[in-house]
Amino acid sequence: MRKAILFFIILVIINTISTNHTFGHPDISPPTLNSGAAIVIESRTGKVLYEQDSNTHMYPASLTKIATAIYAIEKGNIEEIVTVSRKASNTGGSSVYLEEGEQVSIKKLIQGLLINSGNDAGVAIAEHLSGSMDQFSFDINEYLKNVVGVQNTHFENSHGLFDPDHVTTATDMSKITQYAMNNQLFREIFGTKELEWDGQSWDTTLFTHHKLLREKPYEGINGGKTGFVNESGFTLATTAERENLSLIVITLNSNLKSEAYNDTINLLDYAFDNFQTSSIPEGTTFMLDEQEYKTSTKLYYTHSQDDQIKQEIKDNGTVEMINQDDIVITALPLEKIKKKSNIINTPKEITREEKKNVETNKLFENHFTTIAIFGLLIIGIIFIIQTRKTFFIVKKGKIDDTN
């Protein structure tokens, strides 16, 4: 009896474990983070998938270089040669060991800036593009506000060395990175794992400082930038893509490097496990009442993997993506297709046509007599010509008969 009871208990336990394993739902709750601020967004749609204190001002450290790099790509000529100043050469912190008077292309400076986090490269870029660091600070802040569209960022330099007024937010850094990732050259350099560096005084191989790109590879990672100064703690920007999801993760103010990486991995896992990006093909048409709409480009929207999406066309010319809980996930713009009128002529067009006909008839009536006389004259001339031809033919025939 005891054996039977024991067997039954074991069977129930095994069955319970098996059932939980087979039918249990994955944990979809967001991770607990150690970083002071963090955000993960979908890059194509900009949808925020998780955030923590993402609008709090923080010190970005070398994440600043993401902004400097895309600014230099868009505002400079990447093949242009820069002469390194003494000030740039003497810049402290991480470096690519530029020498005063060394001549380097802007592209190579951007590579040294992003891959090896060269502060000296950042100063050389700023001085070349704007003449001085103060002017560069003004220029890049205007660029970030008016071109990229961020509002809570103020940079005092091109590299991220500490300044109490040099601040940003996790939200702004995600937007800056999202904007930069639209540029092909930036993407290439941002995702470079190693690069041969041939400098005037330093020949070496540069390796990315981002561990998930090289030392501890994470599936789908395609770019990253690290940062650290004492006042900012450890900062990390990471981009990754798998199938139908493209992610940007920003973590700021981590006390330990390991915490920054763990938070980043947890946010990537959370996003990849729970979200996906779907699309509506270009040229897809929709009908609302008698008005037809279409998509002028391919449209993307990000949603939970469990969502059952329905579409609803609105009077303002958008299509709303709504899930099974009747929550509007997003509204996407549509292009209105002009209606083809079924009425041949409007009353105004009919009046205009009738007036035109009256004027035409009147013109014909005024010139009818002239036209008639001219026509009779032509007919008479033709008749005379034909009569004379007949006369000569007959006469010639008689003469021939006589002969």
Image: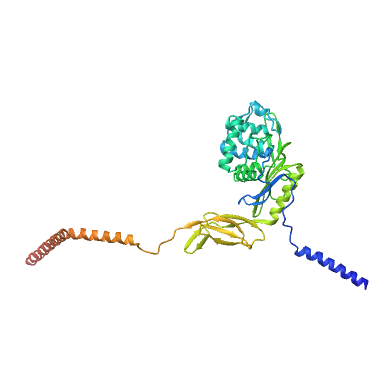
Q: Which quadrant holds the C terminus?
A: bottom left
Can you say whether 213 is above or below 83 in the image? below
User: Relative to 208, is 147 on the left or the right?
Assistant: left
Can you say whether 106 is above or below 335 in the image? above
* Visible residue check, residue 6: yes
* Foreground of the two, 143 or 121: 143
Q: How far from the left and from the top, in percent, is residue 242?
A: 67, 53
Q: Quadrant of residue 309?
A: bottom right
User: Relative to 8, is 84 on the left or the right?
Assistant: left
Can you say whether 78 is above or below 319 in the image? above
- Residue at the farthest left position: 402
Residue beneath the point at 69% across and 56% down: 274
- Which color mode does the image show? rainbow
Q: How far from the left and from the top, in percent, is residue 80?
A: 58, 33
* Foreground of the two, 336 or 36: 36
* Foreground of the two, 144 or 398: 144
User: Relative to 126, is 208 on the left or the right?
Assistant: right
Q: How far from the left and from the top, in percent, is residue 278?
A: 61, 57
Q: Quadrant of residue 155?
A: top right
Q: How far from the left and from the top, in percent, is residue 251?
A: 70, 45
* Foreground of the two, 132 or 383: 132
